[in-house]
Image (cartoon, rainbow, N blue to C red):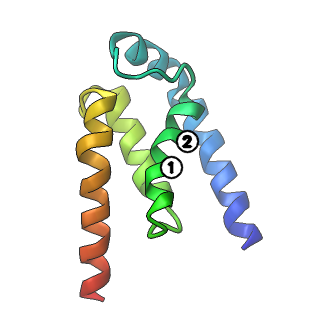
Amino acid sequence: MRIREILLEYNLRNLLSLFSEKYKQVQQKDHSNEYESLEEFIKSIEEPLRKENKFQFIDPYMKWIVQRYVTDNLGLYEDIISKVIPGLLTYDSLKRKKN
C-alpha cells in the first residue's frame, strides 16, 4: 500500500512539473474553472472518481485528462465534470463486467 502512495505522489509531482505553466494559460481562458493551481484542479477531478470508490488507481486517467485539458482537446472544465467523469465511470464499470 505504501508503494502505491509513493507512486501517486511521484506521478502528481511529474504532472505538476509537466503541465503547470500551460495549465495557467488555459485556466485563464476557461471561466468555468475556478481552480488557480493545477494541483487543486487535479483534486477536484479526483474527488468524484474516488467518491464512487471504483477507482483505486486513477493515475492513467488523470494524466490523460490533464494532458487533453491543457491542449484544449477536452473543452471547458464543466465539460470534464459533466461528460468525461461520467464517461470514465461507465468505461470502468464495463471494463470490470468484462473481467
The image quadrant where one finds the N terminus is bottom right
The kind of secondary structure element at disc 1 is: helix
The image quadrant where one finds the C terminus is bottom left
Image vertical order of residue 72 relative to residue 92, above or below: above
Residue lying at 42% horizontally and 17% vertically, measured from the top left: 27
Other residues around mark 1 within 10 Å, as few (<14) / some (14–19) / many (≥20): few
Which three-letter amino acid code belongs to the residue tagged 2? Lys
The kind of secondary structure element at disc 2 is: helix
The numbered mark at residue 47 is 1
Other residues around mark 2 within 10 Å, as few (<14) / some (14–19) / many (≥20): some
Q: Disc 2, disc 1: CB below 8 Å? A: yes
Residue 24 image offset from top left, x and y in percent: 48, 16
Image vertical order of residue 55 relative to residue 27, above or below: below
Image vertical order of residue 30 relative to residue 97, above or below: above
Q: In whole angstroms, how far apart are the C-alphas of marks 2 and 1?
A: 6 Å
For this orientation, the residue located farthest to the right is 2
Quarter-of-image position of residue 80: top left
Residue 78 image offset from top left, x and y in percent: 30, 31
For this orientation, the residue located farthest to the front is 51
Residue lying at 32% horizontally and 36% vertically, measured from the top left: 68
Tell me: 65 left or right of 57: left
Residue designated by label 2: 43
Which three-letter amino acid code belongs to the residue tagged 1? Glu
Residue lying at 24% horizontally and 28% vertically, measured from the top left: 75
The numbered mark at residue 79 is none
From the viewer's side, name the closer residue of 93 and 13.
Answer: 93
Quarter-of-image position of residue 92: bottom left
Residue 74 image offset from top left, x and y in percent: 25, 34
Residue lying at 57% horizontally and 32% vertically, measured from the top left: 40
